[in-house]
Image: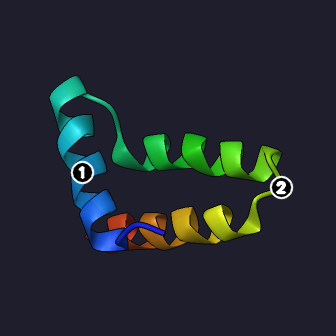
Amino acid sequence: MANVIQISEHITRLSAKKGYDPLAVVGLLTVHALADVDFTTLRFWRNVSERLAAA
């Protein structure tokens, strides 16, 4: 799976460009992983959201 730090920075950069909240973007990606019952991806998005919340 991709690097949490790089993905967090990428989502933050793109969200700022479009005017979206980065945590909302990660939340939608988390819901998508949950709907697919993909717990590995769900754990990854949880780690990304924790990193964004700490920033």
* Residue 17 to residue 35: above or below: above
Q: Which residue in the rendered view is the most extreme toward the top?
A: 18
The part of the image, by quadrant, that contains residue 13 is: top left
Q: Residues within 10 Å of mark 1 (few under 14, many from 20)?
A: few
Viewer-nearest residue: 18 or 43: 43
Q: CA distance from mark 1 to mark 2?
A: 25 Å
Q: Which residue in the rendered view is the most extreme toward the front?
A: 1
Three-letter code, disc 1: His
Q: Quadrant of the C terminus?
A: bottom left
What element does badge 1 sit on? Answer: helix
- Image-based side of 16 in relation to 5, left or right: left
Contact (Cβ within 8 Å) of mark 1 with mark 2: no
Q: Residue at x 25, y 65 (%)?
A: 6
As drawn, the label of residue 50 is none
As drawn, the label of residue 37 is 2
What element does badge 2 sit on? Answer: loop
Q: Residue at x 68, y 42 (%)?
A: 32
**Residue with the mark numbered 1:** 10
Q: Residues within 10 Å of mark 2 (few under 14, many from 20)?
A: few
| Percent of width and height locating residue 37 | 83, 55
- Image-based side of 16 in relation to 7, left or right: left
Lower sequence index among marks 1 and 2: 1
Q: Residue at x 80, y 44 (%)?
A: 35
Q: Residue at x 76, y 52 (%)?
A: 34
- Image-based side of 33 in relation to 52, left or right: right
- Image-based side of 23 in relation to 8, left or right: right
| Percent of width and height locating residue 43 | 63, 71
Three-letter code, disc 2: Val
